[in-house]
Amino acid sequence: MPNFTAHHWPSKVANIIVYLTLLSGNLYSTIIAGDDGLDSPYDSKHHRSYITPARFTFFVWTIVYFLLGGMIIYQWFSDKVHQAVGWHFVFVSILNAIWLLLWTSGHTFFSWITLIFTSGAVSVIYYRLKELHASETWAETLFLHLPFSLYHAWIFVLMIINVFAVFGPVKDDGPSTFHIVFAVAGLLFVASIVVGYIEYKKGDIAGSLVLAWYLFGVYAQQDEPIIHWTALVLGVAVTFYTGKPLVKTLRGRQTSETAPLLG
């Protein structure tokens, strides 16, 4: 690992502060609230729709924040974190906190608007990592690229959940034809994003698996047959599709190994 560096320490300290603040909130919402049987902010009965996933799905946050914790430490040993992320992580964290406040207070429409800006801020980091700061070491892959691939995909999942909480909430008399068609269209849209991750984002397997995980969560949570089985089929399909970059890599190696040494 590179030597310790205190360069750009204000942004690094700010990253630590916002990280610890959001970590405590997310640990409460996904672990403590769940164990106590309380209404988790991410899985509130007041915000459910027909594509809300099972509660276990939200443990993606645990993985994201564990890896971001690695980034918080790694930033003191590599200036590449500041070059790629800078103050953007602080902005993302503030917007995320605002979203959670609006979401838990029942302002689902405004929380959705906030998520649009949050997604934009995360996308800036995601783009910089994908296009400007390619990973050169295993530490950069694990503690810089991977957490933001997961974060980027999960923010998209939250946007889908939020949109349906606004426009297609659960009804006491069960889903109408409109709700079913709307839900299936939403699930198909999620699956189509996987294609984008694999084809246009240099084979982002981590982000694709987050979306597949979400689809399996919908399958586990929703009882309506069409939604239930559509989520399962799409989840299985996109899981297999995420293997495409690996297949290409293996084929490329085999081709290079069998190619003649002299052209």
Image (cartoon, rainbow, N blue to C red):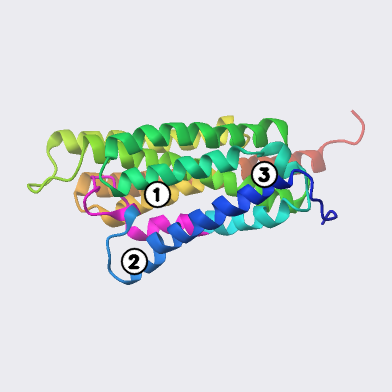
Q: Is residue 193 magenta?
A: no
Packing grade of label 1 (10 A; few <14, some 14-19, many >=20) is many
Mark 2 and mark 1 lie on one chain; the one further toward the N terminus is 2
Packing grade of label 3 (10 A; few <14, some 14-19, many >=20) is some
Q: Position of residue 180 (x, y in %)?
A: 19, 38
Q: Which residue is mark 3?
A: 11
Q: Position of residue 232 (x, y in %)?
A: 34, 49
228 and 39: which is toward the camera: 39
First to last magenta residue range: 42-62
Q: What number is the disc on residue 214?
A: 1
Residue lying at 61% horizontally and 32% vertically, measured from the top left:
127
Q: Is residue 179 something one can see in this rendering?
A: yes
Amino acid residing under circle 3: Ser
Amino acid residing under circle 1: Tyr
Give the CA separation, mark 2 to mark 1: 18 Å
Is residue 260 shown above or below 38? above
Give the CA separation, mark 3 to mark 1: 33 Å
Q: Which residue is mark 2?
A: 34
Q: In this image, 92 relative to 261: left or right?
A: left
> Closer to the observer: label 2 or label 1?
2
Instruction: Label 1: state its secondary structure.
Output: helix
